[in-house]
Amino acid sequence: MKAILYIGHGTRSKKGADEARAFFARVSERVDVALQEISFLELTEPSIEEGFRRCVEKGATEVAVVPLFLLAAGHIKQDIPNVLKVLSSAYPDIPINVKDPFGVQSKILDAVAELVRVTAGPVGFQDRVLIVGRGSSDPATLADFGLIADGVKERLGITGVSVCYLAAAEPRLQEGLAAVLDDAEGKVIVIPYLLFTGLLIAEVKAEIRKWSKLGREIYHTGILSSHRVIEDIVVERALSR
């Protein structure tokens, strides 16, 4: 029997964990596979090991692993494979098929542009967009954010799109937002390139509130999983061979 094990990042935020579980519930209703489990890399239960064990105990003879991660940074390249390697040794008769993270996809960039327009209305040359990434020391991930910025520029028809990070890369959120506000003659739109609510989103909102108290109007698109396309991509991953 095939099982699907979804792996989220995990968060200390109860709201963020609840969002991830609700997202899984919506996806699982659209995937015609009897055995589906959710797990988390860190900070939230159940762990990957526990999720995998539940699959096996319920009769799984093979497990498809679907990471709920936007880009292939260290968690995808190292942390998750290390856990799965141990599980593969513990359950040598259970084949494990790991799906790719989302990557830089046109449909996601289309969704980001749509979120911007829904949040802030029409966007013009005088407006500025700031994409906020989680952050990574992986050069490939930083290159991906360059592609994301280029894709958003193309779809919105503006040049004023920049990127900042919450950790592990520069510029950081505070510096990036200050630079955008200093340059903007029109609207400022912040896009957190994150799937679910959590402490990182809280950090973004706190920085926006600080500037808003100074009289600056800043639009905030919210999390990416608020757009249906993210759910569609996970369903595609789950059903692919």
Image (cartoon, grey):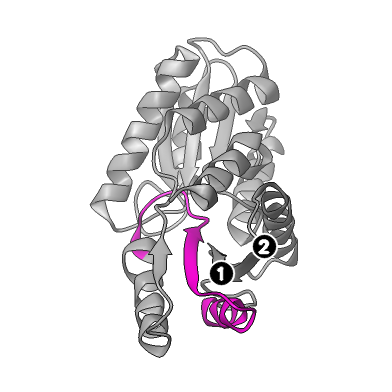
Q: What are the residue bounds of the magenta stretch?
A: 48-74
Residue assigned mark 1? 1
Which residue, as the protein is rendered here, is positioned at the far front? 1
Instruction: Check disc 2 and report its element: helix, strand or loop.
Output: loop
- Inspect this view and state whether residue 224 appears: no
Q: Horizontal placement of 194 versus 146: left or right?
A: right
User: Is residue 196 visible to the viewer in this orientation of the structure?
Assistant: yes
* Helix, strand or loop status at disc 1: loop
- Residue sticking out furthest to the bottom: 90
Tag count in the figure?
2
CB atoms at circles 1 and 2 under 8 Å apart?
yes
| Magenta stretch encompasses residue 147 | no
Residue 149 sits above or below residue 124 on the image: below
Q: Using residue 47 as the reference point, say whether residue 170 is left or right of it.
A: left
Mark 2: which amino acid?
A: Ala
At x 62% / y 67%, what residue is drawn? 38
Q: Which residue is mark 2?
A: 34
Q: Nearer the viewer, residue 82 or 156?
A: 82
Q: What residue lies at 45% left-to-right and 12% top-to-bottom?
A: 157
Can you tell which quarter of the image residue 146 is in?
top left
Q: Nearer the viewer, residue 136 or 91?
A: 91
How far apart are the alpha carbons under marks 1 and 2? 9 Å
